[in-house]
């Protein structure tokens, strides 16, 4: 198998891990905005506190693998999405420090909760914005970014941003249903129903709009129509099931949410391949030499299973329902 | 006013990386300190050690969080501000940082949850393992990133063909000429930072006459480590100086404040200069006679090489490098003196009762952070005008991003980071004011805040059976 | 002769001068071998002080 292909798979793997794991972290954060009871908010944050850091680390993995294996793509895409990336980083910053800061002060806890929630929302939105911007297409000349940093302020990226925020809310709602106590079950169910419905609609709108403005996507539908149609179908079924959650096993909505994202990511992979900068630069054009890719892939092959093992162990330690009185009581 | 993108990109990176380095420096030091404390607790069962652990755990947790989020910024900032650099250096430093993420970041993150929240979920041995894993993670992290930065300072192991870099020897990229000297220097700096932090807080409590046992223990441990570490640090520092003199002579020339190709003999050691880079001279200089020759040439009459030995367009700014170096070195000397004093006071049995010494320690609490920052300014401003020494200049490395975008994001960073550090300081001071045993262990989250106050074992010593915390029934 | 106070002051001064000497040695003024030796002796001396003069009223 060719090296750039394997490297791309690892980037995709890291991104998928990030989207799924930090997806529900950010989703829970977004849902804080709709939770008026302070004690319930505490409970919601408790459910993601022990494992959020590892989850967030996958985005660094994806970014740094891009730097190592596809430096051309890294150096094109980062300036291209300069503003949304920085806003995302600042938002993630607020979210991250709020974990520790919110418990240091009773008086300001509400304000830190707001920072937490808004940070989560902005981060999610920016990530969607970047995704939409990628589908829209980035102006590249001689392997350098040649567009404007404001190219992302257009309909497709904005709709994608909103869509992703709701999508993360689906994951967040599913996680809450799984991990929270009885008092929050109704809230979790409500969140799932609403966000799943809005997510599905926005996702659909974004897809249609993307087809309209991006000839690259049209040609992919022409060549891989069946595969894409299947994925769309699966997506529709899963979102439909989510909007009807009432009495299901606790883990089902969360798994359905994960399934939604896997389907969505697969669709994006079908559309983007074989490019790394969609519709402009292929994997092979952007790749670094084989020595660099090999080192990353060997390291990844050896270490990733270990990482997954102890990450799973950490989740297992904090298994079951999140205790209502917090982790120290 | 015409804004220069390359200057703005540099200021932004300088700001974010300076801010960031404060926190991992603390985290590396405190993580190892916490591991030592927990080991002592497990071994001796003395409650004061658990008290110390829980106290410093809260401050550690806050600092670690800020370190993580400001660190993520940096991994993207290579591309955001310096895309040309990223494109060129990616093949060399990208894999190093990828391995850092794989072996260190995930390790820290994976076990941090157990370390911070698992005291009541897991047995003491597993918890101690988690603390150790976090400490090892910080160590590995420092190692990889130091290698990447050292490669930028003393590049090796690569072949360059019209702007494209290919790695020919990973061993030489990783073990480049300066890595093995800079790594122990940085690690020792981190451990020194923690030593002075804990000793300083302990001294403060003794001055106030509070938390005697806690204070004496932390002061004793802090000064013990500090004395030995600072001796090692000045040794390593001198070796490193020699290495950098060989591989980056322009940096060390700028650091000493001499302009002429061969200085006067004997050469003084300057402590204060007003450099005039445009005219390649000092408008004013003040130093200790003979000491320059003694310290820099190990003789009584040796001449020091000045910055004019480097072509003008390749010279770093002397003002920045000189003063950064003086601050770092000056603090090192003060630390050494404090170390010697602590040994003398131990010998005389007056370590906890000499108020003048306690005041000095209290003031020295942040000394490690300041010295580390200063040292990094030497490293980074002294490397200029290169971003990869001898290969790529900083001005040629900038992203195609308009100056206005750079300026607005710079302002955003300053504002947001300002909030972070203000909150950190406010809460840290609050934790210190409250004292050990009264602070929330740290993110104890919901429910009754009072519940989490009592250290589990202190409240229920019978729960400690054969060194194991029994599970609540 | 000197009283106890003056003796202690003299001791502290001596300790300070010895400290300066160690500093010069460790940073290599007298060569690499003496630097290593100086560092080794300093660390050894510190350890001896920790062991032989334990701090009262503290846990260690």
Image (cartoon, grey):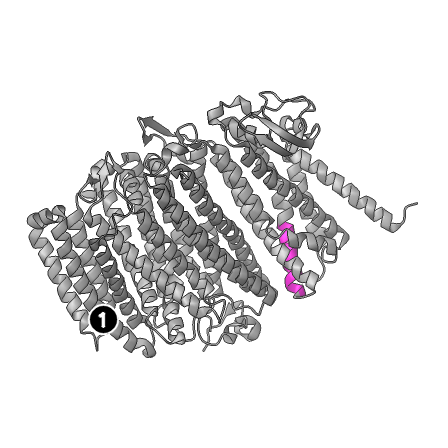
State left or right for residue A289 relative to residue B75.
Answer: left
Q: Is residue B397 above or below residue B421?
A: above
Which residue in the rendered view is the most extreme toward the front? B1
For the residue pair B440 and A138, the one nearer the viewer reads as: A138
SS state under label 1? helix
* Residue B297 picture location, percent across and down: 63, 26
- The x and y percentages for residue B281 are 59, 26
Looking at the picture, does residue C49 appear above or below residue B127?
above
Residue B214: say if magenta: yes
Quadrant, the N terminus of chain A: top left
Residue C8 rendering spot, x and y as whole percentages: 82, 48
**Chain letter for the residue marked with disc 1 in the picture:** A
Q: Is residue C25 left or right of residue B452?
A: right
Q: Residues within 10 Å of mark 1 (few under 14, many from 20)?
A: some
Q: Residue at x 51, y 54 (%)?
A: B31
Residue B176 picture quarter:
top left
Q: Is residue A225 visible?
A: yes
Determine the residue positioned at 40% across, 59% down: A94
Q: Position of residue B349 (x, y in %)?
A: 75, 55
Residue B104 seen anywhere in this rendered image of the structure: no
Residue B118 position by quadrant: bottom left
Q: Is residue A208 left or right of residue B212?
A: left
Seen in the picture, residue A50 relative to A187 is either above or below; the reply is: above
- Main secondary structure found in the magenta portion: helix
Q: Count the marks.
A: 1
Seen at 20% across and 54% down, the residue is A156
A243 inside magenta stretch:
no
Left or right: B394 as drawn, with respect to B319: left
Q: Which residue is mark 1?
A: A194
Q: Which residues are magenta?
A: B212-225
């Amino acid at each position: 198998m060719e090296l750039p292909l394997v490297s791309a798979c690892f980037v995709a793997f890291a991104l998928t891990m990030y989207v799924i794991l930090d997806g529900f972290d950010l989703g829970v954060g977004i849902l804080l905005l709709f939770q008026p009871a302070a004690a319930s908010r505490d409970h919601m944050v408790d459910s993601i506190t022990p494992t959020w850091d590892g989850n967030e680390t996958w985005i660094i993995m994806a970014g740094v693998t891009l730097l190592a294996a596809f430096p051309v793509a890294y150096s094109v895409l980062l300036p291209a999405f300069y503003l949304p990336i920085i806003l995302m980083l600042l938002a993630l910053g607020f979210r991250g420090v709020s974990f520790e800061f919110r418990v240091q002060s009773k008086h300001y806890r509400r304000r830190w909760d707001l920072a937490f929630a808004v940070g989560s929302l902005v981060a999610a939105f920016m990530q969607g914005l970047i995704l939409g911007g990628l589908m829209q297409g980035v102006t590249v000349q001689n392997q350098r970014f040649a567009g404007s940093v404001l190219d992302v302020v257009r309909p497709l990226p904005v709709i994608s941003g909103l869509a992703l925020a709701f999508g993360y809310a689906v994951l967040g709602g599913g996680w809450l249903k799984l991990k929270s106590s009885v008092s929050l079950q109704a809230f979790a169910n409500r969140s799932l129903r609403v966000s799943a419905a809005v997510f599905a609609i926005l996702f659909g709108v974004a897809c249609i709009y993307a087809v309209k403005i991006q000839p690259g996507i049209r040609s992919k539908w022409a060549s891989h129509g069946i595969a894409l149609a299947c994925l769309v179908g699966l997506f529709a079924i899963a979102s439909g099931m989510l909007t009807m959650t009432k009495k299901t096993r606790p883990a089902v909505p969360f798994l359905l949410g994960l399934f939604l994202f896997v389907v969505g990511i697969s669709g994006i992979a079908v559309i983007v391949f074989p490019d790394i900068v969609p519709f402009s630069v292929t994997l092979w054009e952007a790749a670094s030499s084989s020595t660099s890719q090999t080192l990353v892939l060997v390291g990844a092959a050896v270490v990733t299973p270990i990482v997954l093992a102890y990450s799973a162990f950490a989740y297992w330690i904090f298994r079951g329902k999140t205790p209502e009185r917090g982790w120290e009581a | 006013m015409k804004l220069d993108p390359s200057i703005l990109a540099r200021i932004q990176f300088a700001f974010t990386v300076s801010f960031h380095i404060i926190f991992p420096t603390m985290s590396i030091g405190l993580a190892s300190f916490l591991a030592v404390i927990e080991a002592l607790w497990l071994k001796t069962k003395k409650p004061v050690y658990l008290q110390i652990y829980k106290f410093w755990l809260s401050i550690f947790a806050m600092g670690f969080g800020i370190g993580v989020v400001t660190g993520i910024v940096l991994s993207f900032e290579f591309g955001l501000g310096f895309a040309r650099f990223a494109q060129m250096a990616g093949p060399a430093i990208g894999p190093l940082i990828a391995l850092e993420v794989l072996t260190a970041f995930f390790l820290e993150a994976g076990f941090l949850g157990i370390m911070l929240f698992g005291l009541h979920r897991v047995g003491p041995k597993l918890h101690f393992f988690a603390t150790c894993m976090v400490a090892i993670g910080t160590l590995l992290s420092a190692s990889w990133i130091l290698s990447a930065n050292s490669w930028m300072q003393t590049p090796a192991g690569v072949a360059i063909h019209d702007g494209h870099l290919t790695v020919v020897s990973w061993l030489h990229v990783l073990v480049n000429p300066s890595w093995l000297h800079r790594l122990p220097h940085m690690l020792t700096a981190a451990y020194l930072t923690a030593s002075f932090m804990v000793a300083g807080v302990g001294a403060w409590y003794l001055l106030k006459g509070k938390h005697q046992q806690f204070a004496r223990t932390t002061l004793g441990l802090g000064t013990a480590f500090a004395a030995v570490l600072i001796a090692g640090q000045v040794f390593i520092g001198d070796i490193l100086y020699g290495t950098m003199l060989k591989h980056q002579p322009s940096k060390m020339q700028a650091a000493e404040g001499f302009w002429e190709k061969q200085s006067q003999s004997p050469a003084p050691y300057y402590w204060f200069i007003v450099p005039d880079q445009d005219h390649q001279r000092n408008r004013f200089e003040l130093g200790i006679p003979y000491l320059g020759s003694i310290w820099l040439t190990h003789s009584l009459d040796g001449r020091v090489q000045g910055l004019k030995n480097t072509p003008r367009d390749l010279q770093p700014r002397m003002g920045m490098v000189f003063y950064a170096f003086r601050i770092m070195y000056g603090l090192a000397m003060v630390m050494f003196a404090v170390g010697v004093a602590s040994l003398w006071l131990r010998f005389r049995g007056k370590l906890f009762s000499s108020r003048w010494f306690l005041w000095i320690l209290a003031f020295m609490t942040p000394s490690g952070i300041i010295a580390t920052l200063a040292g990094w300014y030497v490293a980074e401003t002294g490397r200029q005008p290169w971003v990869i020494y001898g290969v790529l200049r900083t001005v040629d490395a900038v992203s195609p991003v308009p100056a206005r975008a750079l300026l607005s994001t710079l302002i955003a960073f300053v504002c947001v980071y300002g909030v972070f550090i203000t909150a950190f300081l406010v809460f840290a001071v609050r934790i210190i004011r409250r004292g050990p045993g009264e602070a929330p262990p740290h993110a104890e989250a919901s429910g009754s805040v009072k519940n989490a106050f009592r250290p589990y074992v202190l409240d229920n010593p019978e729960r400690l059976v054969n060194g194991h915390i029994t599970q609540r029934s | 002769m000197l009283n106890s106070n003056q003796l202690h002051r003299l001791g502290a001064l001596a300790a300070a001068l010895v400290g300066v000497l160690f500093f010069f040695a460790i940073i290599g003024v007298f060569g690499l071998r003496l630097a290593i030796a100086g560092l080794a002796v300093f660390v050894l001396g510190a350890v001896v002080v920790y062991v032989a003069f334990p701090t009262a009223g503290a846990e260690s």
